[in-house]
Amino acid sequence: MFDYPVLLIADGDTVMVKFPDVPEALTFGADEDAALLQAVDALETALSFYVEARKPLPRPSKARRGQRTVRPSALESAKLGLYQAMIDGGIKKSELARRLGWHLPQVDRLFDLRHASRLDQIEAAARALGRTLEVRVT
């Protein structure tokens, strides 16, 4: 769902990673593998800006044949999916808090990509939005 294509650009002694769909995400590494490891953090940080600004998340474009992609970690992907479901449904955080019977700071933590929310909390919030949380290992 949040599998973003990247551009890997050799830049002297480093490799730069750019995300065409998320221009705020930009990072470097000593080589391609190191740059791709850094890219996860850069992507999560950039997407957190969208969440903080309450803006829709950029949709990933389709990767070209052989193009590498980067996705947020599993927990962050679940949080971002929940956030996108809330945006798509036109539901505000205060309404989600009401549906869950939670205080607003609890809901705020669900959308904080640096907070280690519990999966059962994300699952409860998804149910409150009429959605389900699906976890797969592929």
Image (cartoon, helix red, strand yellow):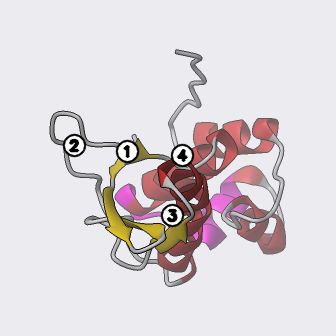
Closer mark to the observer between disc 1 and disc 4: 1
Which mark, residue 63?
A: 2
Q: Main secondary structure of the magenta part?
A: helix
Over which residues does the magenta segment extend? 88-99
User: Quick one: which residue is furthest to the left in this view?
Assistant: 64
Q: Earlier in the sequence, mark 4 or mark 2?
A: 2
Gap in Å between the C-alphas at discs 4 and 2?
30 Å
Q: Earlier in the sequence, mark 3 or mark 2?
A: 3
Q: Earlier in the sequence, mark 3 or mark 4?
A: 3
Which mark, residue 43?
A: 3
**Residue wearing tag 1:** 69
Q: Position of residue 37 (x, y in %)?
A: 60, 52
Q: Assign a secondary structure to mark 1.
A: strand
Residue type at numbered disc 3:
Leu
Considering depth in this image, is 55 or 36 the residue closer to the camera? 36
Mark 4 touching mark 2, by CB under 8 A?
no
Badge 1, how many Cα within 10 Å: few under 14, some, many 20+? Answer: some
Badge 4, how many Cα within 10 Å: few under 14, some, many 20+? Answer: some
Gap in Å between the C-alphas at discs 3 and 2?
16 Å
